[in-house]
Image (spheres, coloured by chain):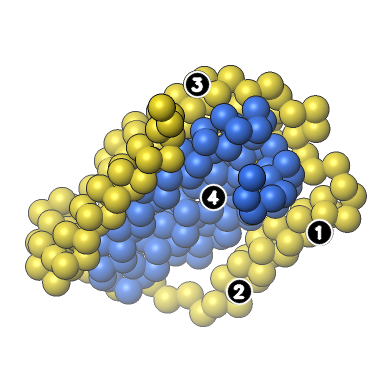
Chain colours: A blue, B yellow
Amino acid sequence: MAIPTTHFVILAALLFAVGAAGVLLRRSGISILLGIEIMLNAANLALVAFGRQHGQLDAQVFVFFVMAVAAAEVVVGLALLVAVFRRLRSIDVDRLNALRW
Amino acid sequence: MVTLVFYLAAAVAVGSALVAVSHRSPVVNVLSLVVTFFCVAVNYALLGASFLAAAQILVYAGAILVLFLFVVMLLNAPELPQAIDPRPIQRWLGAAAAAATALAGILLVVAWRVTPPVAGPGGDAAALGRLLVGPYLFAFELIAVLLLAALVGAYVLVKRKH
C-alpha cells in the first residue's frame, strides 16, 4: 500500500519548522547553516512528494538542481565562516555587527 | 510494512533534526544531521525516487556533512556560553514563527482534497538522465559553472594574504 502524499508533506512541514527554529534561535554560524540545510531538505521532500502526486519526473530534476545549488551554497557559506572566524576568533553571529572593518 | 518504515523514518528524521538544531556541541549537531539525511533518503526511496535516494546519501551525507565536520574541527571554536539567543523577545518570536510555519503547513495539507497519486514514470536513473540532458540541458550545464564559481569563491575567501 502506498503512503498518501499528505503524510510526506506533513513530514516536510515539520522538518522545515525544525530547520527554521534552528536558523532563528541559534547564535553559532555553523548551526544556522545546518538549519538552512534541513529546510532545503524539507523543501526537496515536498517537491518529490508532489511530483509523485502528479505523476511527473520534472520535480525530481528540480530536486537534483537544488542539491547542486545547496552544495555550492554550503561551500561559500563555510568559507565565509572560516574568514569571519579568522578575524573575530568567534562564530557568534551577534558579533557580526559591522559592514566593514 | 511500508507504512511502518515510513513512520519509523519520519520519527527518526524529526527527532534527529531536533537534536541537530538544539544540542550544544557542533560535532553532535553535524552527526545527528547525518541521521536526518539518511531518513530523508529512505523517504525518497519510498516515493519511488531511487536515484535521488542515492544522490541524497552521496551528496549530503557524503560530501556536504564531511565539509561541515572539517570546518567544525578546523575552527575548533570555543562553545558559546549561550547557544540559544538569550534575548527573550527574539527567542519567543523565533520559536513562535517556527511553530506557526509547521502549523500552517499541516493545516493547509489537512484542508487539501486528497486524490490518489497519478501513475507516472518511476524515478530511475535512466529516465532522469534523459530529462537532464534533454529539456534541462542548459540548466545542467549552468550547474557546472555554478559549482566552479563556488570552488573559486571559497578559495578566494579563505586564502591568506601574503
Residue type, numbered disc 3: Leu
Counting other residues with Cα less than 10 Å from the Cα at mark 1, is it few (<14), some (14-19), or many (20 or more)?
A: few
| Marking on residue B108 | 2
A4 or B72, which lies in front? B72
Q: Are marks 2 and 4 on the same chain?
A: no
Identity of the amino acid at label 4?
Ile
CB contact under 8 Å: marks 2 and 4 = no
Q: Secondary structure at mark 1?
A: helix
- Which of A20/B158 is in front? B158
Can you give x and y, in whole percent of width and height, for residue A64 in the image? 29, 55
- At mark 3, the secondary structure is helix
Would residue B161 appear left or right of B112 to someone viewing this image? left
Q: Looking at this rendering, what residue extends furthest in the right direction?
A: B88
Q: What is the C-alpha distance between the residues marked 4 and 1? A: 18 Å
Q: Which residue is mark 1?
A: B93
Q: Are marks 3 and 2 on the same chain?
A: yes
- Relative to B126, residue B34 above or below: above
Q: Which is in the foreground here, disc 3 or disc 1?
A: 3
Q: Is residue A75 visible?
A: no
**Label 2 packing within 10 angstroms: few (<14), some (14-19), many (20+):** few
Residue A59, horizontal then vertical, whole percent = 31, 66
Q: Earlier in the sequence, mark 3 or mark 2?
A: 3
Amino acid bearing label 2: Leu
Image depth: mark 3 or mark 2 in front: 3
Q: Disc 1 and disc 2: Cα gap in Å?
A: 22 Å
